Image (cartoon, rainbow, N blue to C red):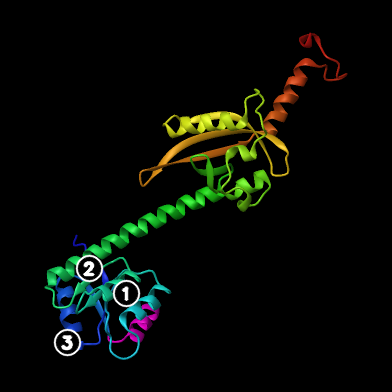
Amino acid sequence: MNSSENKRILVVDDSRLSSQMISDALRKHGYTVKTAHSGEEAVEHVLNGSPLDLVLMDIELGKGMDGIETAHAIQQRKELPIVFLTACANDRIMDKIRSVTGYGYVTKGSDEYALVSAVEMALRLFETYSKMKESEEKFRLLFETAHDAIFLMDKDIFIDCNRRTLEMFGCTKEKIIGKSPYFLSPERQPDGELSKDKALQKIKAALNGEPQFFEWVHIKCDGTPFYTEVSLNSFCVREKKFIQAIVRDMTEHKRMQEELRLLSITDPLTGVYNRRYF
């Protein structure tokens, strides 16, 4: 299937002759083309016309809004790739283009294959960007609705956390971001080891590719201690390693364990220790 099939492009050019030539070239390659001859008309079409996949925008549009202003107005309302048409590509024009879009430009008078290549590249870039954004939105949804607390860390510094974290630790995000794990821990863990030393050992191992799973005593922001299970895993973003920490509140689990232990060593009627205790 041709990649241009069913792709809809709005050509914005105040020159009707230029607009017609560009439209004919695009239609020859399978694109559906609409035209507008002013910035105001382009914005109106984007807002109220048929759906679009890309806008091909002349920078100089005569009276009224120029192409840069029109592009800003469109992007404030709709997320669309915009490729600019320009008669010259000097530094001033390039700075203007970069302030609006990352989808490039085509010099007026270029052959139709240069035009079509620029359009195809912009459409592919936008598709990739849209998929990445969708993936990020799905991750954020899972992140924020998780039952467990989730921290994201740069080495031993918290850089993000989900809503469950704030509920579990009883504090605001501002009190967590920029802090270290031992900020939310007592000075020592139950085995007597310093929380800071032990946490740094676990983080170092995770950064070296060794997933960590362990019990940990945390403290809430009001100083209340509670038992947790923690898992640490590293992940890479643009070749930089980060840590994901998942924290599960084990308070209820520990309480039930203690109740079962007491039931096993005491008489259920009298509460007196039985022979298993001695």
- Residue type at mark 1 is Lys
- Specify the segment rendered in magenta: 37-48
Give the CA separation, mark 2 to mark 1.
19 Å
Q: Residues within 10 Å of mark 2 (few under 14, many from 20)?
A: many
Q: Which residue does the image show at 31% across and 86% down from the upper left?
A: 38
Task: Give the number of the disc on residue 60.
Answer: none
Q: In the displayed structure, does residue 135 sit left or right of residue 18? A: right
Q: Is residue 164 magenta?
A: no
Q: Is residue 10 visible?
A: no
Q: Quadrant of the C terminus?
A: top right
Q: Which residue is mark 2?
A: 119
The dominant secondary structure in magenta is helix
Q: Earlier in the sequence, mark 3 or mark 2?
A: 3
**Secondary structure state at the residue bearing disc 2:** helix
Q: Earlier in the sequence, mark 2 or mark 1?
A: 1
In the rendered view, tell whether residue 193 sits above or below residue 18: above
Is the residue under label 1 in contact with that under label 2 (CB below 8 Å)?
no
- Residue type at mark 2 is Val
Q: In the displayed structure, does residue 118 sit left or right of residue 172? A: left
Task: Give the number of the disc on residue 96.
Answer: 1
